[in-house]
Amino acid sequence: MSPARSAEHQAVSGHAPDDPGVCARTPGSPAIHAIELSKRYGRTVALAGLSMTVARGEVFGFLGPNGAGKTTAVKLLLGLARPTGGEAMVLGAPAGDRETRRQVGYLPELFRFQSWLTAREVLVLHGRLMRLPKARRAPAADEALQVVGLSGRGDDKVGTFSKGMQQRLGLGAALLGEPSLVVLDEPTSALDPVGRHDVRVIIRELRDRGTTVFLNTHLLEEAEQVCDRVTILSKGRTVATGTLGELKTTRPSVRLRVTGLPGGWWQPLAGYGRWTTEGDWLLVADMAVGRVPELVTAIVSLGGQVEAVIPEHQSLEESFLELLGEK
Amino acid sequence: MSAIITIASLTMREAVRRRLVAAFAIISVLLVSLSGWGFYRLSHGTGLTSGESGLALPQAVVLFMFMFSFVVALSASAVASLSVSSEIDSGVLQAVVARPVRRSDVLLGKWLGLVGLLAAYTAIVSGLLVAVVYVTSGFVPPDAAAAAAFVLAEGVVLLTLVLLLSTRLSALAAGVIGVALFGMAWLAGVAGSLGTAFNIRAMHTASEISQYLLPTDGLWHGAMHALEPTSFLAQQFAGSPVAQGDPFLAVAGPSWSYLTWAGIWLVLVLMLGLVSFERREL
């Protein structure tokens, strides 16, 4: 079992599916806990048994190519669609629970606000819908406008906003009322580099405040910069879950510069991994974790002189493609 | 309850902000003013005896209200179809229903807001019409308030049906089906009048069934009856035994049992709409 898969196993098996403690509406329960969550549309399987646990206070990346089922999973978690199998708990209550939604901020992937309202009116409306006290609505709206960099545009109609500004406003609406869980579905898809940077800053601030962030994205760089853990989804299935470090070292490899090896040297060393030569260098791929010192010792014992040992770091993109079977 | 009020007021505010109310106000004032000129010519025109004026005026009022009921129905159909389906397509509703609100409250709020708009529109236009007709011709319909209530009820019936359709179909499909059903129901009513006049039982029965399936035409008959003085009806039927075939004459208003059915129909369709929206995947 690869480290990533074992991380996934730990994440899921940390709580038995039938453990009543998992489902209890307690502050200690995970922010999100899904067990074999599935969704079919006719013959099309959009989500095939998603199991994951998102701890409170972590920034969790939900990665996958287009059509992997990420948005479907988000909709199931928020009660916008009904699962055809499995179950999910959000903040200790069944997914879609109305009262729990007071504690959840959501930025949909495709959305639009009422174009005839001003940005401040949109936020006040959402404050009203989430039952913020009347006196808190206007200050909360102004606060949200400031956080997302729209404080000078509060009185402008949403219809005059660019796509990026609408996305900023959507993020502002998701942050209203200091929710315990913020679900962001492709939050930077319409943003320029400055906007993307701002969103990353906001996500880090949310983490510092102890807010759980569920970040649905196909931008690996984004996940790499802010996420504590990620799940990679492909064709409706979880292919890996773990920290970014775990995912990047699923199949470590090492580059060696060695001289003085006798003929037939590769026979006793074949078991360490997949060997290839590149000029004076030897590349050992698919190594088991932690076997590099043992390999160096074996080379030396054969009479080889090790001049350089360079561990090869796998990028998240490489891991991602590998996990999706694209490499 | 607060979510219902929030959405209802949002719906009404949208109509004002999008200048829907202003557009309707301008068109209505224009129509009523033009009709005022017509009513003046009918009552003060040369070549018409007072008896002939007495026959022409109620019929002209009915024709105006028919045109107005059509505008109300079209408006109800258009705003209802846009308020759910296109808001789902554009993603406006997804952002709303993700909040701690019941979906049924969102739909009820929209329904209430639209009914409020229709009620205000119907009351204002009907009031203006009655005032203009009285000032220009001196004619006062027997029960203008009841006629306005029937026209409003007709609009609310269509609004509720289109709102239900809009929870599942595209805005265009829901609106077109609503208007087409409204037109078919009116035609069935005309066929029923002809069936009564010429004693063709099958046509009469078909019309009655149609009035139960979609009560718009049955309610329109109530509006017509409330606008026609008894003396006018008596003169019409005395003049021609087949006057019952005239689609703009109503011998009697709808019975209480029929009105009860219309109420039940409305509640059932509204509830169906609530359930449909509740179960809709967004």
Image (cartoon, coloured by chain):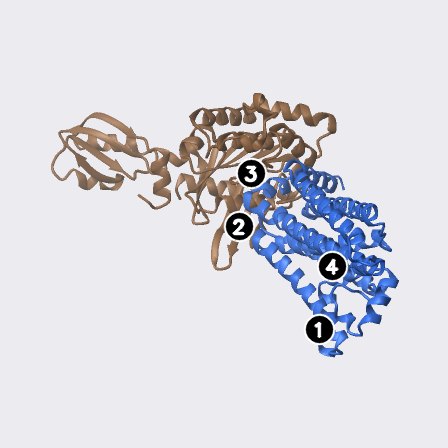
**Label 1 belongs to which residue?**
B206
Q: Amino acid at mark 1?
A: Ala
Q: What residue do we see at 57% from left, 53% from top?
A: B172
Q: In terms of image quadrants, where is residue A93?
A: top right
Q: Nearer the viewer, mark 2 or mark 3?
A: 3
Front-lying residue, B193 or A24: B193
Q: Amino acid at mark 3?
A: Arg
Q: Earlier in the sequence, mark 2 or mark 3?
A: 2
Q: Chain of mark 2?
A: A
Q: Nearer the viewer, mark 4 or mark 1?
A: 1
| Spatial separation of the CA atoms under disc 3 and disc 1 | 46 Å
| Spatial separation of the CA atoms under disc 4 and disc 3 | 32 Å
**Label 2 belongs to which residue?**
A36
* Residue B268 - label: 4
Q: Nearer the viewer, mark 2 or mark 1?
A: 1
Q: Earlier in the sequence, mark 4 or mark 1?
A: 1
| Spatial separation of the CA atoms under disc 2 and disc 3 | 31 Å
Location of residue B255 in the rendering, given as x and y in whole percent from the top left corner: 84, 65
Q: Are marks 2 and 1 on the same chain?
A: no
Q: What residue do we see at 85% from left, 67% from top?
A: B235
* Residue A112 - label: 3
Give left or right: position of A83 versus B272: left
In the figure, what tint was chain A given? brown
Location of residue A233 in the rendering, given as x and y in whole percent from the top left corner: 44, 44
Q: Are marks 4 and 3 on the same chain?
A: no
Q: Secondary structure at mark 1?
A: helix
Can residue B53 be seen here? The reply is yes
Q: Residues within 10 Å of mark 1 (few under 14, many from 20)?
A: some
Q: Chain of mark 1?
A: B
Q: Quadrant of the C terminus of chain A?
A: top left
